[in-house]
Amino acid sequence: MAVYFDEPEPGRHAGVIRQSDPEDDLQIFSDDEPLDPILYGKHCQGPTRAGIFQDARESVDRIKRFYIEGKMPDMLQEAFDLGNSDFPLSERLSLELAAILKEIVPDYPNPANHVDLSLLVPMADRVWNFALSSGDPDLQDKAGSPIYRCYEHNRQFDSARRVLEKLLEIARRETNGLSEAVLINNYAFEYLLEERWQDAVSIFEEAANQFKESGDSFEWANARANYWICRLEIDRQACIGACEKELPKIEKFFAERCDWRLRKMLVIRARIEEYRGRLNSAVKLLQKAVKAARDTNTCYPEIDGAYMQRLIENMATFVD
């Protein structure tokens, strides 16, 4: 068997060995020509080309075909098998897998998704480990967003934050203030999803300040809404006054766009009303919150509905 290497080319970034994809650079050829054509001077087909990425390439192609055909169980199983295999990955294959993840994994928290995304985690692990070992910021940036969401949806919040930390490092190096603010807000949201309010609150405040500096008033309002959600969980009594004072300013931005995230403000007001013992008023606010998030393909209608049901049960107990 003969092995042929192309000459490596300079990398695009420090730490990248070559610009061209190893899937193209490294080819293995097997001397498997039948003996008879050689002995009798007949036409030879030549050695068989067998790239070291061939198994992974075939698996990726199957994943894409299953996805196009709508065969989600088959696609997820193939992705799971590839993630647990020892097939070498190339940069091109990693980018294709990242694109597949981007198509499949919802790019927002708490999706109403009945697909078992846990089967994608081993593949996400492999793609992210490849991206880190490559030292290529472009690959890390393209792969990072769908991969951290994949971890988030599987409640692997530490893993999600580690990916976000790398994405933040890239955004800061490129001095992209708005992208940095988005990533800071999303980083804090991982803590919110864990109900680690104290860890999240100061980071949301940082995100809001950066949005303000970048001139994005709508995202400032969203980060401040997240901030108040956490503050009210930490010490509702101490912050109700300041919260109520700022709420109209935040609500204005959501109302102007008829944005479904107005539900955050309705839930915040419901929590304040609950604290004051006005359960009937809180229930009415939560009814509006459920309606606001009804067509968002998220779990928020169920989450807010469960909160509302708890208050209704509390009201019945109080009446009894």
Image (cartoon, rainbow, N blue to C red):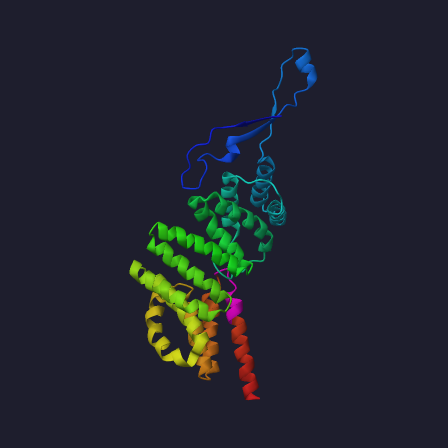
Q: Quadrant of the N terminus?
A: top right
Residue lying at 32% horizontally and 70% vertically, measured from the top left: 249
Q: Is residue 207 left or right of residue 43?
A: left
Image coords of residue 11 (percent x, y): 42, 37
Q: Is residue 301 magenta?
A: yes
The residue lying furthest to the bottom in this view is 320
Looking at the image, how many numbered discs can be counted on the residues? 0
Image coords of residue 204 (percent x, y): 40, 65
In this view of the protein, can residue 240 be seen by the observer? yes
Q: Is residue 76 left or right of residue 216?
A: right
In this view of the protein, can residue 215 be seen by the observer? no
**Where is 263 relative to 120, above or below?**
below
Segment colored magenta = 296-304
Q: Is residue 40 magenta?
A: no
**Where is 25 relative to 64, above or below?**
above
**Where is 307 relative to 187, above or below?**
below
Image coords of residue 38 (percent x, y): 66, 14
Q: Nearer the viewer, residue 173 or 141?
A: 173
**Where is 308 relative to 140, above or below?**
below
Image coords of residue 27 (percent x, y): 55, 29
- Classify residue 292 by image quadrant: bottom left
Residue lying at 57% horizontally and 52% vertically, measured from the top left: 121
- Classify residue 224 by image quadrant: bottom left
The residue lying furthest to the right in this view is 36
Q: Is residue 274 left or right of residue 249?
A: right
Q: Quadrant of the C terminus?
A: bottom right
Residue lying at 50% horizontally and 31% vertically, measured from the top left: 25
Q: Nearer the viewer, residue 66 or 153?
A: 153
